[in-house]
Amino acid sequence: FAAQENISKQERQKMINTAHRGASGHAPENTMTSFQKGFEMKADYIEIDVQMTMDGELVIIHDTTVDRTTNGTGYVGELTFEEIRNLDAGSWFNDDYTGEIVPTFEEVLDAFHGKIGILIELKAPELYPGIEEEVAKTLKDRNMHKPNNKKIIIQSFNHESMKKSKELLPGVPHGVLAGLSWAGITDEQLAEFASYADYFNPNMNIVTPSLVGRVHEADMMIFPYTSRSQKQANHLINLNVDGIVTDYPEHVYSHPVHH
Ligand code: G3P
Ligand code: CA
């Protein structure tokens, strides 16, 4: 980790280290194995993508189709839970992971809450009417919606969905995700986001020192996505962001990786 040497240990350790879709550089994304790996690597949070099956089950998968990360085909919202559950979600990554399955939201909460933070992304919630209520109910059933219940954050690229979710779960921190088109964001737009969000989480390519300062000025925190190299992680640490969403948690702190 020679490349980490110019940044102090203290500076690295204050970064909130977030394992993107789990430690997805090391194991198939959004599986129990990638989440477990994120935990073992001592990340602060795992990031998960939540969608809904045709029959209303909340499942953890990134794309709106199962094509890329399983051996099946079709839209998540047009398959039943049973159909999705029978798919292999590991072999696309590497033969060693054959037999991985698509986890449910409940399984991830029950296995990891209290062990590691969970950054919950509602992925394409416009495709799943009522998903905000389902997520809220699932968290409330487990008493994970209280303001003192740290280390649960909900975020989405769909900002209307976040407004709605914040009303359902006022005690839970929320985040707005912002792609490249938000490079020119104004202070007025940041203030509007801050009226319901606690985090402004942009594509790392639009992050500048001035943006970091303005997000803080608006009273939000900033967790840019997605770092995939040591150089990118160092760059974000030097920009003084609050957290880093990365496929490789070891780029933020130098913890050994056990395969
Ligand atoms: O945490 C942000 C990041 O997960 C957003 O991008 O496409 O990987 O879901 P994506
Ligand atoms: Ca995500």
Image: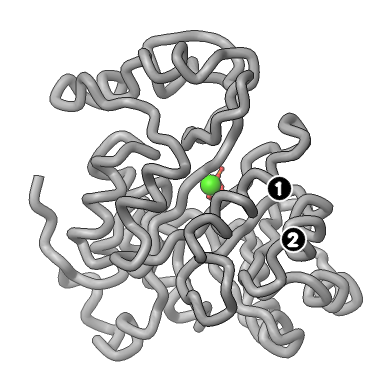
Q: Is residue 220 left or right of residue 5?
A: right
Q: Which residue appears farthest toward the right when viewing the image?
A: 188
Image position, residue 222 (x, y; %): 59, 73
Residue type pointed to by label 1:
Glu
Q: Check the image and report above or below for 121 versus 84.
A: below
Q: CA distance from mark 2 to mark 1?
A: 7 Å
Would you say the residues marked 2 and 1 are in contact, meaning their CB atoms lie under 8 Å apart?
Answer: yes
Write the residue at 73% across / 57% down. Answer: 165
* Residue marked by disc 1: 133
Q: Amino acid at mark 2?
A: Leu
Numbered disc 2: secondary structure: helix
For the residue pair 151 and 225, the one nearer the viewer reads as: 151
Residue extending furthest toward the front: 141
Residue 32 or residue 218, whichever sits in front: 32
Residue 239, image x, y percentages: 52, 79
In the rendered view, does 257 fall on the left or right side of 166?
A: left
Q: Give 114 or 184, whichever is nearer the viewer.
A: 114
- Along the polypeptide, which appears first: circle 2 or circle 1? 1
Q: Residues within 10 Å of mark 1 (few under 14, many from 20)?
A: some
Residue ID for mark 2: 168
Q: Is mark 2 within 8 Å of ligand 2?
A: no
- Residue in the image at 67% along x and 52% along y: 156
Q: Indicate the position of residue 193 as horizontal and vertical percent values.
A: 80, 70
Q: How is the image coloured?
A: one colour
